[in-house]
Amino acid sequence: MPPELAVIIPVFNEEALIGQVLNDWSNELQDIDYEIHVYIAKSKDKTLEVVQEFSQKNKRIIAHDRPK
């Protein structure tokens, strides 16, 4: 069954901010069934690693990487 809400977040080189964004969204949506899809567009920083770390802790967060 699909979630009640799917959040789509496109990012490029957002290593410094994406962690806070994911925390904020997760806290705000904790009472509903949701998924957060983060689309990483050829980032040269560690955005992918940050999102993957969050994804390991919260299976509702899904990283989609576009290779460099």
Image: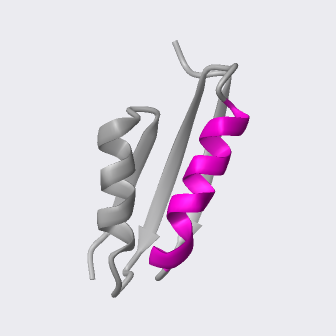
Residue 4, position as x, y percentages in the image: 67, 22
The magenta-colored residue range is: 14-29
Tell me the residue at 29%/41% (across/down). 56
Q: Is residue 57 above or below residue 12?
A: above
**Residue nearer the viewer, 17 or 37:** 17
- On the image, which quarter does residue 33 sit in? top right
Q: How many marks?
A: 0
Tell me the residue at 31%/54% (across/down). 52
The C terminus sits in image quarter: bottom left
Residue 3, position as x, y percentages in the image: 59, 22
Q: Is residue 67 above or below residue 44?
A: above
Query: What secondary structure is the stretch in magenta mostly built from?
Result: helix
Q: Is residue 41 above or below residue 45?
A: above
Q: Is 28 one of the magenta-colored residues?
A: yes
The reply, left or right, for residue 40 in relation to residue 25 is: left
- In this picture the colour scheme is one colour
Q: Is 19 one of the magenta-colored residues?
A: yes
- On the image, which quarter does residue 5 sit in? top right
Residue 41, position as x, y percentages in the image: 43, 75
Residue 61, position as x, y percentages in the image: 45, 42
The reply, left or right, for residue 16 in relation to residue 5 is: left
The reply, left or right, for residue 67 in relation to residue 39 is: left
Tell me the residue at 35%/84% (across/down). 45
Tell me the residue at 29%/65% (across/down). 49
Q: Residue furthest top?
A: 1
The reply, left or right, for residue 66 in relation to residue 21 is: left
